[in-house]
Amino acid sequence: MVGDRSWSIDMQRYNFQFTGQRFYRIRGGRLAGQVRDVAYQATTTDFWGALESVGGRSTYQLGGAMNCGKAQPGQIAAVSHGCPSVLLRQINVLNTRQEGGR
């Protein structure tokens, strides 16, 4: 998954679903083509339990919204985060394509 697109997470921060800007199939440790209309979902404990490998320093990327604006008068707080690439196994991947859509 590359980038973020939309996400949903419950109030307890336990069940979640994420979509990205781009998803790639991986076969034999190599990128094997792009896939469309994809989301993944899990519970927090299942997600971290599926972590098999963490990339090195060269894979680290800063992400997130960079700032969060709230209230009146307006207030801004830094909320960005970063992480290296990771390999997860047994995460529920969904086809999100809507029939009759684009």
Image: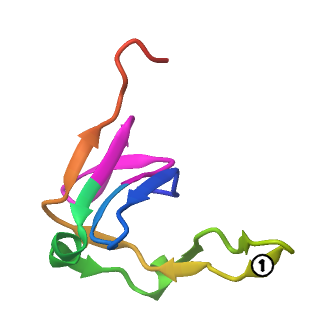
80 on left or right of 24: right
Report the residue at 62% width, 80% height from top: 79
Q: Nearer the viewer, residue 41 or 23?
A: 41
x and y percent of residue 10 in the render?
35, 63
Number of residues whose C-alpha sits closer than 10 Å to that of mark 1, classed few (under 14), some (14–19) or many (20 or more): few
Residue farthest to the bottom?
A: 57
Residue 17: horizontal and vertical position, in percent?
A: 34, 55
Magenta stretch mostly in which secondary structure?
strand
**Nearer the observer, 15 or 37:** 15
Position of 30 with respect to 71 (left or right) is left
Secondary structure of residue under mark 1: strand
Name the image colouring: rainbow
Quadrant hosting residue 37: top left
Where is the N terminus found, in terms of image quarters? bottom left
- Which residue in the structure is indicated by mark 1? 76
Residue 77 higher or lower than 67, as above or below: below
Q: Is residue 27 magenta-colored?
A: yes
Which residue is at a point 40% across and 12% down the rendered structure image? Answer: 100
Judge whether residue 48 is colored magenta.
no
